[in-house]
Amino acid sequence: MYHKEKSLQIKNSASALYNNLGVLRIAPKQLTYFTVVHANVVNMVSASWDGLNYSHRQLQSKEPNVATSTSLIMQAAFCALPSRDLLVVTSQKGIQIYESDGSIMVYWHALETPETPTETAVFARGISAVWENYICVGVSSGAILVFDIPSKGTPILNNTNCNLCLWKSGEEFQVLNKIPGFDMSCSSVKLWKGTVVAGYGSGQIRLYEAVTGILHAEVNAHARWIYSLDIAPFSGLLLSAAEDSLVRVWHLSMTPETNTVEVAHLHNECVTDTQICGAKFCDGDGYAFAVTGYDLSEIIRYVQP
Amino acid sequence: MSSRTLPLLFINLGGEMLYILDQRLRAQNIPADKAKKVMNDIITTMFHKKFLEELFKPQELYSKKTLRTVFDRLAHASIMRLNQASMDKLYDLMTMAFKYQVLLCPRPKDLLLVSFNHMDAIKDFARESPSILAQVDETYQQLIEMYTPLSSGDFQLIRQTLLIFFQDMHIRVSIFLKDKVQNSNGRFVLPTTGPVPHGTQVPGLIRIFSCTGEELTRLQFNNGGNYTGALREGSFDLCGERITKLGTNMYSVSRPVETHMSGTSKNSAQHKKVNSAPNPLAKEELNLLAMLMGGLEVDKPGNTDSGFRVNLFATDEEEEEALLSRPDELSYGIINIQATQDQQTNAELAKIMGEFPQGEDHPSSASSKGDDLLAMMDGL
């Protein structure tokens, strides 16, 4: 179904972090941006669609006032909002928001870190663009920081809310539902057509109806911890990647009459001897996808012939 | 990342160090009493009460340089000497072995079982010495207390922190190459066969449910591997079957320890840049070293009759050759006292290394963590 294409080389290897691959398609410029995190550096590659031009950039996690400290980055992700695209980078120290090409930092939010390290880690992770103009970022305490993103200028921290699973966003955020955990870490979540798709440390993928929390489907998908999920919204293709070296492509389909969701397995790719840490579709149809792995200094690409 | 990583890093690396030294001591036919003394001296220093107190405090991982310095000191806690080349090789082996174990842990919590495997072996090394056994048991208790309540997510964070520490290390180890667990490019083999981790199902099943919760369909898919069901869970108690073999002693007299220096990752130079901190010894790291020095109550090598040198290579010529041909990017950058620019750090480090005579005045600066510790050390 897919075959391997020419890999993109990156300056450093990828760190073992969840969802460690960001992809942004810039149609007007015929470019795609990729981001991969290595310790305290974000490696950015910009690849032209004709495969002829590549450029690289590195962003270091640096707090404005603390010149000497280094801080490990937890995640870098693109947020594509109707008005603008931004790159969000979260670390142990705080959250940085850049223009999507990484050229300018437009916002910095420091997390409250205690003087001496505490038993529980402090960090921010889990980045999502919501509705028209919000970006949400999870914090290790369980809170979610919400940023108002104006179409131009500086983002504003809106409010902080705690321990919520599903919100309806409109004028304000309201809690709709909480999906109970089951003593297993959830490392990746995607929302598609009212269905929550969640990947777990046990290697399972579960699909829930967002509003009611009903379990639609359960897949024993991987033999190790799942690190990344992605959905191609136009085709309903689901991509899952795990420490077990496998990337799998699935197809999701809804049957509104019976209120059920079907999951069909389509394809496997094995990245030999690699613990995969990021996998993303490169376009909304799922025509191509890209993969990163721990200790690997390349972005591997697969495309449908 | 996780502030609970250092104890596991230290104990597992220490365990690997003991396996390797034990093998070399036997291979070089060091007299049993001397060999026993070396092993006991190292174990008792590793698990010194004050040292453990410092180790188990929540803190960020030490830099590679500092950790290497700590193990340098630990390896020399007794009458045994190691040349630079041998120490480098010892450290290479220790780190690649533990990297392998962390990478191959079926689930993050198994990292604790790996640690218990090392602890079980250390307990066996110390079996004839009741006071050391007591120290080992105390360490078990601290491990159990700190780690058994953690969730799988917490363990995965610890594991990810360790993987960042070991990133880009691809030193080829003879015993791994022979056993086909490492490829000739230095990367470890990750099999898609064998038992799944405890708590995971063999991949292959899709279950679809109706909106009332009853199972509507079951579908099978090809998982692309050859997996079997999970083994039973290992024991997290003081004693018990750990089930996993990761962390057990893979050396024996007939399987020598060797590394190959070629085929290193081209990213290692880049990685070194990422890791170099402006202050090679931050105050916190100073604490641990200070505590380690405090635990060194053993005979110093003033008596040259009892001291001896251990070689990690087959011959002295090989050892010398290894020192000369070691690639720059693999040097551990042992903290060179002369090269340190920071005067204060220089003075403190020099004291720790025992270059200043006891009882010398030290600057009466405002009380800070480092100064208190130095005062404590002077009183030892």
Image (cartoon, coloured by chain):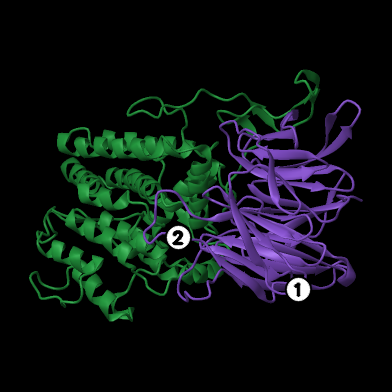
Please tell me which residue is depicted at 42% across the width and 29% down the height of the picture: B242
The percent position of residue A205, horizontal first and vertical second, equals 71, 35
Chain coloured green in the rendered structure: B
Res. A120 visible in picture: yes
The percent position of residue B39, horizontal first and vertical second, equals 23, 45
Quadrant position of the C terminus of chain B in the picture: bottom left
Chain where mark 2 sits: A
Please tell me which residue is depicted at 46% across the width and 33% down the height of the picture: B245
Chain where mark 1 sits: A
Residue placed most toward the observer, B358 or B172: B358
The percent position of residue A249, horizontal first and vertical second, equals 80, 41
Residue placed most toward the observer, A2 or B372: B372
- CB within 8 Å, label 2 to label 1: no
Q: Relative to residue A165, is residue B156 drawn left or right?
A: left
Query: With respect to residue B353, does A282 lie above or below?
Result: above
Chain coloured purple in the rendered structure: A
- Same chain under badges 2 and 1? The reply is yes
Q: Amino acid at mark 1?
A: Lys
Label placed on residue A187: none
The mark nearer the N terminus, 2 or 1, is 2
Looking at the rendered structure, the secondary structure element under dot 1 is: loop
Q: Toward which corner of the image does residue A46 lie, by quadrant?
A: bottom right
Q: Disc 2 marks which residue? A: A113
Q: Relative to residue A225, is residue B304 drawn left or right?
A: left
Residue placed most toward the observer, A99 or B285: A99
Q: Relative to residue B313, is residue B200 drawn left or right?
A: right
Q: Amino acid at mark 2?
A: Thr
